Image (cartoon, grey):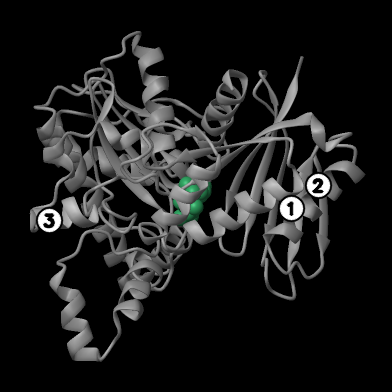
Amino acid sequence: MNEKYLVVNCGSSSLKFSLYEMPLEKLIAKGYIEKIGLDDSFWTISYNDEKITGAKRLANHSEAVKVMTEELINNGIVKRMEEIKGIGHRVLHGGEIYNDSVIIDDKVLNDIVKMTNLGPLHHPGEIDGIKAMMECLPKAKQVAVFDTAFHQTMPKDSYIYAVPYEWYTKYKVRKYGFHGTSHKYITNKMQELFHKDDVNLIICHVGSGASITCIKEGKSFDTSMGLTPLDGLVMGTRSGRIDPSIIKFMADEAGMTLDEITNELNKNSGLKGICGKNDFRDMMNLIKEGNEQAKLAYEIFMDSIIKHIAEYYFELEGKVDAIVFTAGILENNTSIRETLINKLSGAMGIYVNQLANDNIGYGHDLKEGIITAEESKIPVYVIPTDEEVMIVRDCYKLVKEA
Ligand code: ADP
């Protein structure tokens, strides 16, 4: 019998959900509830090519979940809420405790609460979402799918920082890595394509958040994000890798507090910090107008991707089955893909296949495929990621086993 499952992604003031029919993995409806906690909260639900919209003050996540359930029932998307058997929550940080998805019980919820120190920007909203769903849909089982879990296979020499070791043993300061659900989805897809488990890959997930993962023998071996998602690549609003001394320097020179500096590094840095625009398309439009800051942001952004690919190419001793481009920017923007391949060409012997590259992505029927010429030493694939389907698969599997 087909059953319904929800995938939920909660922020501090937002709740995104997707409703699936399982085991068909059929997406039935998708919704966004925004500005929770403010006077002008509003929501949009897509169902059967229609848009259902509404607006009223939603004081908290509980009220948002109530609106979601009312809309699902009133629009005939579900007949009774009991049809929903499971709810998969995207949870940022599983620390060293969780290397896989898990049914949420009191202990798990308590662990997620305790790990708020590792995910201060994300966990409060996610916890509110889990509690609200428990309250409104008490019969459905809740599952946590952690962004860090897939990277728990990294060896110690990848995840330990060269800082006093006690920072790790006492405070758990280490590299955790993120976007794990996406990197796992791509790894599984490539394992199917190559008909083998022990694939070596360099996966470039480049959207407004961005991370690159080195997959060795089918497992996460190293990744660019660290203790938090701030490290690694230059992103839409995040600085990525910087000299840590900058923090004290700015505290001394500009009289900023640690919280203010952390906020600037997370929300006002990256592309936005350099050219004022965090959205890649907006930055490209500025470049077309001849804006020098936008050109500079583009060059720095590209360099940061190249440097990480280079690192992982050497970590894999050049034995790379494929490089994979995924997420918003690399799935859709043909010119950045071409430039990246041209920049890697001399060192790695890879060459763009113009026709293939021009015909995959935004506005095209073809969404995935190889974009390098046959004579390339390593193929470069474009594969759209699907974190939600991974979450619903894990949720379904755990609910069935429970
Ligand atoms: P996240 O999930 O981290 O919010 P996404 O993977 O959705 O990010 O990617 C968002 C980014 O992708 C934005 O910078 C946006 O400009 C870029 N993007 C989306 N579509 C296109 C496109 N057609 N061409 C270029 N960039 C695009």
The percent position of residue 392, horizontal first and vertical second, equals 59, 30
Where, by quadrant of the figure, is residue 153 drawn?
Answer: top left
Where, by quadrant of the figure, is residue 317 drawn?
Answer: top left
Residue at the (79%, 54%) spot, across then down = 66
Residue pointed to by mark 3? 166
Residue at the (26%, 56%) spot, across then down = 231
- Residue contact at pointers 2 and 3, CB within 8 angstroms: no
Task: Report the mark closest to the observer, 1 or 3.
Answer: 3
193, above or below 237, in the image: above
Residue at the (74%, 42%) spot, across then down = 137
Label 1, residues with CA under 10 Å away: few <14, some 14-19, many ≥20: many
Left of 386 or right of it: where is 152? left
Quick one: 41 or 284, which is closer to the camera? 41
The percent position of residue 309, horizontal first and vertical second, equals 20, 40
Cβ at disc 1 under 8 Å from ligand 1: no
Between the C-alphas of marks 2 and 3, the distance is 47 Å
Left of 38 or right of it: where is 111? left
Q: Can residue 370 be seen in this view?
A: yes
Q: Which mark, by number, is residue 65?
A: 1
Sequence-earlier tag: 2 or 3: 2
